[in-house]
Amino acid sequence: MNQLVFIEGNQVVTDSLTVAEVFGKRHDTVLRDIRNLDSSKEFNLHNFAEVEYQDNKNRTYKKYLIKRDGLTFLVFGYTGAKAALFKEKYIAEFNRMEAELEKMTQPSYMIEDPVSRAKRWISEEEERQQLEQTLKIQEPLVNFAQSCMASERSMLVRELAKLACKNGIVIGEKRLFQKLREWKMIMANKNEPYQEYVERGYFEIAQGVRDVNGTPKSWLTMRITPKGQAFIINKLKQQAS
């Protein structure tokens, strides 16, 4: 059995794969249970994070990272003696891991043992220097992403590619289209976004009909919104780092 909880992004979480294994459910059933929760949008955003993972055949699927409160809400309706036992184990494991995380992040000046305090200080200094270096490297790209968020208009893919090149991200229109297909944001056989990303507010679609030699032809133009621009630039930045 997988470790019940783990540290991800300086937070203690479990994931939907582990929940499915622990409670003897299909993973798609757990995903459905999460998506059908009656909890508020704010609660879901704070406690469930949809991420991608690869199986042992390098196929990409979706799963959720789940915080303690999200897990409690999710498994509230899972009944039976076995379910009750694993609820208790999850609670105990969350408590244990949160205590471990607190020790790991405790500032050096609060540690009484001089050896441990010195080790923690060295670690803090290394983290500080690494963060300063990372911020220095990423500052132009971060500023670019922020400018995308401040943009008031949507862009064509070729416009975003040109803007990216002007800001140090070397990519052409064709390559950017290829990236969007690799990320499964647009369809493989045509320049049209998947509905999921339209609903997220990353793309806008303009449709119409024009006359071509007396025959009406429909047309479609895909534009990337300011929100989508920032998302795409951040993805490109992560791959470049």
Image (tube, rainbow, N blue to C red):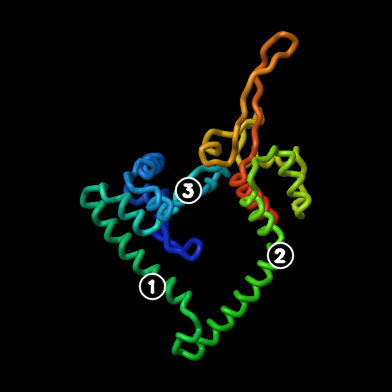
Disc on res. 137: 2
Label 1, on which residue?
Answer: 99
Residue visible at 39% across and 69% down?
A: 98
Q: Nearer the viewer, residue 115 or 77?
A: 77
* Residue labelled with disc 3: 50
Gap between marks 3 and 1, in whole Å?
A: 25 Å
Left or right: 46 as drawn, with respect to 89 = right
In whole angstroms, how far apart are the C-alphas of marks 2 and 1?
Answer: 34 Å
Q: Is residue 230 visible?
A: yes
Q: Nearer the viewer, residue 180 or 5?
A: 180
Crowding near the residue tagged with mark 2, few <14, some 14–19, many ≥20 C-alpha atoms within 10 Å: few
Residue 109 vertical position relative to residue 126 in the rendered view, above or below: below
Measuring 21% from the left and 48% from the top, which residue is drawn there? 80
Which of the marked residues, 3 or 2, is nearer the chain's N terminus?
3
Q: In front: mark 3 or mark 2?
A: 2
Q: Name the quarter where the C terminus is drawn.
A: bottom right
**Amino acid type of disc 1?**
Ala
Amino acid type, callout 3: Glu
In the rendered image, residue 71, in percent from the top left (x then y), is placed at: 34, 54
